[in-house]
Image (tube, rainbow, N blue to C red):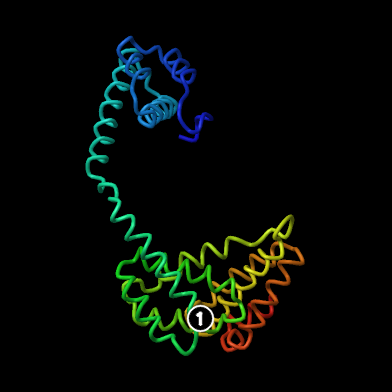
Amino acid sequence: LVAFPNGGVPSAGDIEEFITEFKLDQGAASMLRTHRNVEVKAEVMLWVRGTMRNKKAVHSIRNVSSVVVKRVVMLDRQSKQKAAEAPPPATPSERKATTDTARLITSILNKVAPDNMGTLVDQLVELCQDSACATSAGEKLFAVATRFPQYFETYADFVVATREKLPLAGLHFFDAALATGAAQVPDCQGEAAEERKAIYVGFLKLVAGLFVRGVVGVAQVEALVTGLMNQGTPLGAECVVELLRNSAWTLDQCPRGREVLQAA
């Protein structure tokens, strides 16, 4: 669909150009002009262009028109079947339940402290009985923890304790959040630059805490260090220092970790 500049779908002009280019007969042209599913039309047009470009055989006008009609019918049938098999939209009560669960998760994470950790872990595990909820909880945990970097060790302990009781989520409990955070190196320009920087430093501290506890691997720390160093900016260097400050001793205990330290 990216071949069409108009939001990824063919415009009326694109369709007319296609009809002229392949000399479609009246039936095929009418179907292409009037069909309601623009994604089906786009897929047919791209497929025909690719096929005609790659095949050496010469297609007659009738063959191209016939192919267009057949593919529109086939893709339309597939699209309707897919729509029929899709789960029904959430009811208002289901949406409310999802919202309430999200609020409860956030409330739990905002209260994390060493003296109530066991209770809060049990509450979170009780809420997160499917992988989607657990992943969402992991993302929220990262969001909360990175705003309170002074407590990164407490939140790292909370992740470990939760993962031990939440086998359904397994390694995926925080993987999505880790990948998201690793990709969001802050831009220290404009408004709220210092706030963005502080949040990212909090993220790095949490990663270091999870690495020390064996949740994050050397490869993930190495990837972060390499990405930050490749920026070639003072901020990147500062972030590397912050990450290694809290993980250097553990890195030094294995050969690959020592290589990371030497490279930095």
Q: Position of residue 161 (x, y in %)?
A: 41, 83
- Disc 1 marks a residue whose amino acid type is Ala
* Residue at the spot 59% in from the left edge and 75% down from the top edge: 148
- The extreme top residue here reads 26
Quarter location, residue 245: bottom right
Question: Given the current orientation, which residue lies at the most extreme right position?
Answer: 234
Residue position for label 1: 156
> At 36% across and 65% down in the image, what residue appears?
101
Q: Residues within 10 Å of mark 1 (few under 14, many from 20)?
A: many
Give the side of residue 177 with respect to residue 183, left or right. Answer: left
The vertical placement of 86 against 192, above or below, is above
Q: Position of residue 46 (x, y in %)?
A: 42, 29
User: Please, what secondary structure does the residue beneath circle 1 have?
Assistant: helix
Image-quadrant location for residue 247: bottom right
Query: Which residue is at a point 44% across and 72% down the rendered structure image?
Result: 107
x%, y% of residue 141?
48, 71
Query: Which quadrant is the N terminus positioned in?
Result: top left
Q: Nearer the viewer, residue 116 or 172?
A: 116
What is the total number of numbered labels drawn onto the structure image?
Answer: 1
Quadrant containing the C terminus in the rendered view: bottom right
Q: Is residue 263 above or below residue 47?
A: below
Where is residue 28, by image quadrant?
top left
Residue at screen point 22% across, 44% down: 85
Residue 181: percent from left, percent from top? 56, 65
Left or right relative to 160: residue 195: right
Q: Nearer the viewer, residue 231 or 253?
A: 231
